[in-house]
Amino acid sequence: MIEQKRVAAEVLPPPTLRYGPLRWLRENLFSTWYNTLLTLLCLWGLYAALSALLEWAFTRADWSVIPANLKLLLVGTYPAEMLWRVWAVLYFVVFLLGGSAGLWGSLLRDAVVALSAAFFLLALLPFGMSERLLLAGLALLGGGMMGAGWLLRRAARLQTWSKRILLGLWVLSPILVVVLVGGLPGSGWLPTVSTEKWGGLMLTFMLAIVGITTSFPLGVLLALGRRSELPVVRWFSILYIEIIRGVPLVTVIFMASVMLPLFLPGDTRVDQAVRAMTAFTLFTAAYIAENVRGGLQNIPRGQYEAAHALGLSHFWTTVFIVLPQALRAVIPANVGQFISLFKDTSLVFVAALLDLFNIGRSILANPTWLAHDSEMLLFIASVYFVFAYFMSRLSQRLERLLGVGER
Amino acid sequence: MTKAARIPFWRDLRVLRALAQVLFVIFVILLGNWLYTNLQANLKRTNISFSYDFLQQPASMGISEGLPFQPTDSYQYAFWVGVFNTFRVVFLGMILATLVGLIVGVARLSSNWLVRTLSAIYVETLRNTPLVVQLVFWYTAVFLKLPRVDESLELPGPIYLSQRGLVMPQPQPTESFALWGMALGGGLVVALGVYIARRIYLERVQRPGTPWLWGLSAFLLTALGSWFLLPQAPLRWEPPVRGIFNFEGGMQFTPEFTALLLGLVIYTAAFIAEIVRAGILAVSKGQKEAARALGLTDFQMLRLIVLPQALRVIVPPTTSQYLNLAKNSSLAVAIGYPDLFNVANTIINQSGRAIEVILMIMGSYLTISLLTSLFMNWYNRRVRLVER
């Protein structure tokens, strides 16, 4: 009898607090006199700011500067007849993302849904007909690949193989993307497009992607070097990391753009984009090294001892035991690094490159668009914001998914 | 037995380690040598030799603010003016960013929904856009769009905002300033005396207390008392006088300086706000409840329980935000504020001495970073957990 009662008591749902809107208002906005005062002050400030902003945005602002220069802002002076290659890159990336979302699910699925929805919404905007069709195609491809991946998940053998293929494609993707955009020297159907013609948002992404993929291995090596038992290697790594972290990125880019040619044999010609990429690589590697070091330090001694007990050498312990755990733990931190690298690409003005921000500034220098700086800068800032916010949300959820800090 | 115990040298860990390091050193030397020979060849080709002699030559450029500067002054002096300008903006920026960051960080934990949401929007917006875009926005879309001097915006103070930047009243010493200065010196001695006396007293009765607060109050009391006792106030607020093209008197800040300071402060404050929030959240609820159970007042709880524990979490990441602020000040080059990097850039363009000047730039930033981290590490040692 008593037993039964206890069971019944356990099954009861927790008491739910029901709020009326008035109660919510009172508790969250007007709980005390100073909260009321704060609320009123905020409301007044919000009203003043929003009304001024909206009045400006809809009556005085002239947004025509954006559509008139959209191509420049997106791809710079990339030759128009070669634009299909940029589209191909987009399709390739959406293909990979969609397939992975279907096969692995969870976080990627939401990301691809959001991405496809964004492409679909963009397709509704009044671009040219072919662009709109291509954008709608991207949305469809994202959804379709996700469905295909989901179907593949049902079949065990196919699933493992398709996962392997996708992983291989992911590893190769930075090279494929660079080749697609930059071209293959001496090939008929992919003529080279020199980096001077890259620009706009595309250049921003290329710099960020190349920067992060090349700096990652270097950063891991530096992190291992900093924890090495060999004093010479350790001191070299510490010196490198601390010097780079002590100087601003602008000076590193500037140094690469001015000094790199001085340190190479006389006849080598390195173009500005490659110099900037070198700077981003050298700079980001130091920060990634510190992130990875955090991951390395969090590996319990027992892991090393177990590996030694199993007879693994120092090298194989690092490869099979230490790095997989350390790198997994620092994925969110490195996503954060990627976001800041994405934002920092706007500093390439010191190397005279025209990424999204700097091509915007050069458009503003054109007498036709001289008075449109507020519109242009707000547009550019919101483009950066959309991508950075999207990525930081993803990384926060990734952190929860991986359970970093909870194990 | 002894023979079997000997390890062949190619499996001896000590030998292997030494070998690995020697190989590494050889690799680094070879790389360095290759770079150095290239550099020598390139320099020979362009007929430049490495030397700092050019620093004494006249700079023949203009620097619009900071220390007074003539085009006939040397490159070296120009560089120092740049360093001074960097220090000026970084120092003010650190203080203001800490203040704004504290306020926003506390606001993010407010019980008021609107305050919480607005501060969250502030943080997210500023953290997710590049700083240089923000700086250029403040400069070209806000400060350069301000009205001309004769129509400038007047804020209470009076503080004037115009295309010429920010102008505010400046305290000017009057005749009684010297007397007041002496009174201040006296106050300092009195404060020290009160502090020591209070410390000795507390030591004797074995009770906790705040001797520094007593000392500070003593100093403030003498300062304020002498201010009002003197026949004439020792400092006078000299308001700026609006002319047709420019202001006269008062403290004047150029639009470049103000835009850079504003941009740096509100950008860094967004990061500091998140640190402050995390720090306060990191103090467990049990600590506050225990403080209440001990009968501490609200203020005592904040000062003795919450803040010391929150600071421990707040200080190290704030240090790196200060370092970021110092490094980000180099973005002044995007809006034409003559800071260290901007001036050095001009020096390179004029003298063609890239390597020498870049070494100077890097050395300066490294010094600034080092000084900041030394100071913050000293502070961190004071607030960190003292374990038994």
Image (cartoon, helix red, strand yellow):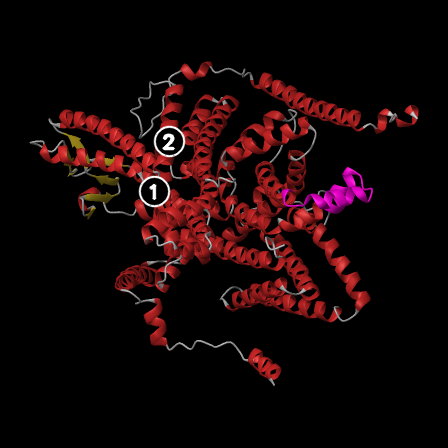
Write the residue at 38% across / 60% down. Answer: B116
Q: Residues within 10 Å of mark 1 (few under 14, many from 20)?
A: some
Q: Residues within 10 Å of mark 2 (few under 14, many from 20)?
A: some
Image location (x, y in percent) of residue B304? 38, 46
Inspect the image, locate mark 1, and give the three-letter code of the amino acid beneath it.
Answer: Leu
Foreground residue, B385 or B130? B385
Q: What subunit carries mark 2?
A: B
Which range of residues does the magenta coloring cover?
A297-321
Badges 2 and 1, same chain: yes
Quarter containing the N terminus of chain B: top right
Foreground residue, A3 or B90? A3
Write the residue at 58% across / 19% down. Answer: B43
Residue at the left extreme of this rendering: B231
Rendered position, B281 above or below A251: below
Quadrant assignment, res A147: bottom right
Write the residue at 21% across / 36% down. Answer: B220
Image location (x, y in percent) of residue B122? 39, 55
Foreground residue, B158 or A386? B158
Magenta region includes residue A307: yes
Q: Which mark is residue A163?
A: none
Q: Which residue position holds label 1?
A: B96
Mark 1: which secondary structure? Answer: helix
Q: Can residue A77 be seen here?
A: no
Whole-angstrom CA distance, mark 2 to mark 1, is: 14 Å
Mark 2: which secondary structure? Answer: helix
**Lateral position of residue A141 relative to residue B247, left or right:** right
